[in-house]
Amino acid sequence: MSPIHLAIVGVGKIVRDQHLPAIAGNSDFRLIAAASRNGTVDGIDNFKTIDAMLEKVPAIEAVSLCMPPQFRYEAAQKALAAGKHVFLEKPPGATLSEVADLEALAASKGLSLFASWHSRYAPAVEAAKSFLAGTTIRAMQVIWKEDVRHWHPNQDWIWQAGGLGVFDPGINALSIVTHILPRPVFITAATLEFPENKDAPIAADIRFTDAAGLDLSAEFDWRQTGKQSWDIIAETEAGRMVLSEGGAKLAIGGKPVHEEPEQEYPMLYRRFAEIIRAGTSDVDLAPLRHVADAFMLGRRKFVDVFYD
């Protein structure tokens, strides 16, 4: 079967660290073009804009969009209008409405749209989901704290309206939680901390429940120094479950039960090829919907100015 001719838009750190190696290792794709204001990819055609790329390289069959979410809708709309399948980096857009519009456009054209949630493909996530499906969950705590100065240095867009702030990493936790829980959850209360000089939050404290009254809390913070925390802890009838290191490791009752090499982005591209071949889309908006609900329901608290 011939490889799918792929292009990538927005050549930044995540593309170099994750997308390019994953694409290079996947025989279902052949990268033939890139568009970016500031970056290029060796050995292929490079352009400054997606418009120029789509015009000059008609052989493109699919496009991965890796620019900040505030700018993703316009690029996705252009790619779909040109008849290309579209891969959306997380979060899939700046608003729920624009992603819903893209989903409808893709369906009308018989194209595949993929809202990718890379943390769902962390090594121990499926094992955690299977464990929770076979027991009663009494409570769950999400602790997602990291150092923004290390992971997002000098990235002004992430502090702007629509950049999500601490929800940029926090949505990774939400993508796992919404995948592993047996029932949907909804937010009951939230407090969002905004630095006085930023338009996006630096921390969030969120409470959730479900139809059965689950006690679920989430703490997101971008001011963590030292060891980073990406943990989901569940108290269950079958013992305490700890899904740690962003979904990489699983322990139940204090005993490690699952540990495999990380393959998040290779698995994302396998999934993208799968839905293209099947003529379907994969657009789960639950994680983004929770972020929107937190902004809608959350109490805003202003904290000291923050400089990175």
Image (cartoon, rainbow, N blue to C red):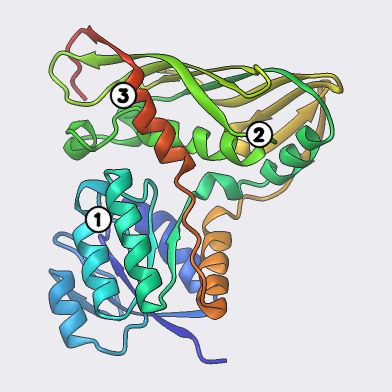
Q: Would you identify the image quadrant in which residue 246 lies?
A: top right
Q: Nearer the viewer, residue 25 or 174?
A: 174
**Image quadrant containing the N terminus:** bottom right
Q: Position of residue 74 (x, y in %)?
A: 19, 60
Query: Mark number for residue 296?
Result: 3
Query: Mark number for residue 183?
Result: 2
Q: Circle 3: is it few (<14), some (14-19), or many (20+) Cα within 10 Å?
A: few
From the image, state whether disc 2 or disc 1 is nearer to you.
Answer: 2
Task: Note whether residue 228 is visible.
Answer: no
From the image, state whether disc 1 or disc 3 is nearer to you.
Answer: 3
- Residue at the image position 17 percent from the left and 36 percent from the top: 156
Secondary-structure class at tag 3 = helix
Query: Mark number for residue 72?
Result: 1
Q: Is residue 179 left or right of residue 62?
A: right
Q: Circle 2: is it few (<14), some (14-19), or many (20+) Cα within 10 Å?
A: few
Secondary-structure class at tag 1 = helix
Specify the amino acid type for callout 1.
Answer: Arg
Q: Position of residue 91 (x, y in %)?
A: 37, 46
> What is the tally of numbered marks visible in this picture?
3
